[in-house]
Amino acid sequence: MEILCSGRLGAADLACLETSCRMFRGSHEIFPKKFRSVVEFVAFTLCGDQPRDLLDRCDGNWKKVLRFLQSLEQSSGTVATSSGNMQVTTGRHHTLLVHDSSVYSCGSSLCGVLGHGQDTTQCVTFTRINFPSFSHVIHVSASHNHAAFVMQSGEVFTCGDNSSFCCGHGEVGRAIFRPTRIEAMKGMPCVQAATGLSFTVLLTKDGHVYTCGTNTHGQLGHGDNLDRPTPKKVEAFEGLGRVTQIAAGSSYTLSVADDGTVFSFGSCSNFCLAHGDQHDELLPRAVQPFRRKGVHIVRVSAADEHAVALDSIGQVYTWGRGYCGALGHGDENDKTLPELLSGKRKTFVVADDGSAFAFGWMGFGSLGFAAGERGGAPAAGLLSPPLRGSDQHGPVPHLAVTTRGSIFGFGDNERAQLGLERMRGSLLPTEIPLHTQDTT
């Protein structure tokens, strides 16, 4: 029991033990009758005190509760697969892949966003990015025109268009063609980065938030509209709680505090701040509907025109522009406040059984099923993205990682952003061969 309850085994490991060994299937009258097996009791022990609603949503199965909680601990979209830890993220015309702490990129190298140097304009297959640091990469974030990489050491590297100072290297108004360390963050180890349109948000291990880049709408959270050439701490979070997760939309920022409060700031032209109006916020402001209802949010995702949130019992909320059904409420109405569910224009949600559901705009095969099929087509075994709102209209790639470490892509591939050679696009999820290569 000591080994089983040590926390070293995941929910999937416990399920395998239960199905493969008779000893773990029954309770053997050792544990209370409400636990169907030894494994179920172990899962209950590992979960600790959890809301009854969460157990009910998991059909009374403590293994499912444990799987949900452990998926939340895998921060920033990195998932453990049989092929190693993986994360995949997409920009407008490029894709970044983390595979066992190495990073690969493919697509169009607009302003050096692929990180392979000035001579590389396109990579049609995933190509390994060389870093000047020996530390492993644990998290990546891709935007339209720049990218950020968080290392195991807590260092942050960026590359891409720095004309708006979004790369954080000071007043260097030129493209950064290879990943370069942000010297201003020395001594402040980070765990996550979020890249918006020409601005960057960083989260440190201590739960502090730093921002840099363009600040037209107050998306940097400093109470003004001044651009910042290097990361500056968002002082307004002092006294509001420790921040545990961040997300960046096109011109706004979302953050989650350790008490489940969501804060938003920046542009509200698309109702993405969830305050019921279209007024920009220059400082972090709590999203009151969640507070009033006692909803504890654990994850948020920010798209260009809408946002998504996941609460502590696995329920999903959306708000913002509803064009093409992007919010998933069965209509195209805008939502000025978060609304519980019973993507520019599409959203993906992965259920606890690995099924993937999509809703919103279907152009370029961006939902992953052919025209004429209804939304919510399941794709078994999908792990990543666990929660994502996609708001890119037009040639945008979409990728997902399976439990076996396979990657499937769909959508537009005109600039090789899916890593599929000799294909201009894919209406259905297509497996991407990972014949990764090093930069020459």
Image (cartoon, rainbow, N blue to C red):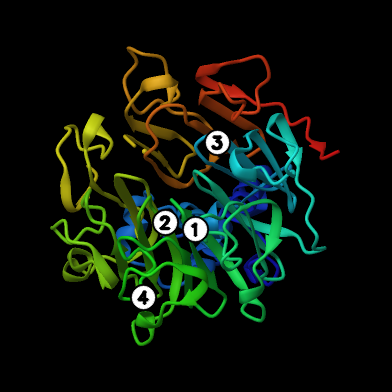
Between 108 and 88, the one nearer to me in the picture: 108
Q: Which structural element holds mark 1?
A: strand
Spatial CA distance of label 1 from label 2 is 5 Å
Name which residue lies at 72% across and 70% down: 153
Between 183 and 190, the one nearer to me in the picture: 183
Q: Which structural element holds mark 4?
A: loop
Where residue 267 appears, x then y in whole percent?
A: 27, 57
Name which residue lies at 47% across and 40% down: 353
Circle 3/circle 4 CB separation < 8 Å:
no
Density class for disc 2 (Cα within 10 Å; few <14, some 14-19, many ≥20) is: many
Mark 2 or mark 3, earlier in chain: 2
Foreground disc of the pair 2, 3: 2
Spatial CA distance of label 1 from label 4 is 17 Å
Name which residue lies at 54% across and 57% down: 76
Amino acid type of disc 4?
His
Q: Is residue 426 left or right of residue 434?
A: left
Name which residue lies at 43% across and 79% down: 242
Image quadrant occupied by the N terminus: bottom right
Give the residue number, with chain letter if any, for mark 4.
222
Give the residue number, with chain letter if any, for mark 2.
248
Residue 400 — which label?
3
Amino acid type of disc 1?
Ala
Spatial CA distance of label 3 from label 4 is 35 Å
Mark 1 or mark 4, earlier in chain: 1
Give the residue number, with chain letter if any, for mark 1.
194
Between 376 and 167, the one nearer to me in the picture: 167
Foreground disc of the pair 4, 2: 4
Density class for disc 1 (Cα within 10 Å; few <14, some 14-19, many ≥20) is: many
Foreground disc of the pair 3, 4: 4
